[in-house]
Image (spheres, grey):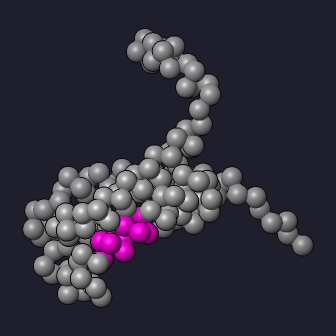
Amino acid sequence: MDPVTAWLRTLLAPLVEGLSTCLLARIGLGTMLVLAGIHKLLDPAGWTIYVTDWLAPWLLVSPTLFMLLNGWLELLFGGLLLGNRLVAPAAAVAAVSLPATIAYLAVVAVTDGLFVDILVRDVGLAVLAWVVLLDALEAAPTEPKE
């Protein structure tokens, strides 16, 4: 083991031995969703900047209402993750919606040069969502075959 890793392991020994990294990932994803949801509800207009002029006509509702609806959904799914309830379905929503958001942001980044910083961040969040989803599926009891 290299000296820096050995030092970190000694320093963080109580965490290394007593904390589940999958629990930490679930709490991190859930917290991010709850905080994003709260902010969307408090300042939906601040989030509408991510709706480009060419996307707005495709929405069935106004960009502000779209963000408000997303805020409530993020609160719901983040709360489920934090409450350790329906973890696989809640994580699946994030694991599917984040790559869709990444695809949209990639198009915007290429065509308009916008939101590259958000795109990069969301790639990491998508991986986090997949870690939580795969862990929940692995931990889920299986039905016996008859």
* Residue 67 among those drawn in magenta: yes
Residue 11 in view (yes/no)? yes
* Residue 143 among those drawn in magenta: no
Q: Which residue ends up furthest to the right in the rendered image?
A: 146
Q: Is residue 59 above or below residue 133?
A: below
Q: Is residue 82 above or below residue 88?
A: above
In the drawing, does residue 23 fall left or right of residue 70? right
Is 46 in front, or is 19?
46
Residue 50 in view (yes/no)? no
Is 128 in front, or is 84?
84
**Numbered disc total:** 0
The quadrant in which residue 18 appears is: top right
Residue drawn where x is 28% and y is 85% of the image: 61
Q: Is residue 113 above or below residue 56?
A: above
Residue drawn where x is 62% and y is 25% of the image: 17
Indicate the position of residue 127 as horizontal and vertical percent values: 43, 52
Is 5 in front, or is 11?
11
Residue drawn where x is 52% and y is 41% of the image: 24
In the drawing, does residue 74 fall left or right of residue 19? left
Indicate the position of residue 108 as horizontal and vertical percent values: 17, 68
The quadrant in which residue 101 appears is: bottom left
Instruction: Point out the stretch of residues depicted in magenta.
Output: 66-74
Indicate the position of residue 7 as horizontal and vertical percent values: 45, 12
By secondary structure, the bulk of the magenta-drawn segment is best described as: helix
Quadrant showing the C terminus: bottom right
Indicate the position of residue 4 as horizontal and vertical percent values: 40, 15
Q: Which residue ends up furthest to the left in the rendered image?
A: 112
The quadrant in which residue 110 appears is: bottom left
In the drawing, does residue 38 fall left or right of residue 118? right
Residue drawn where x is 36% and y is 59% of the image: 38
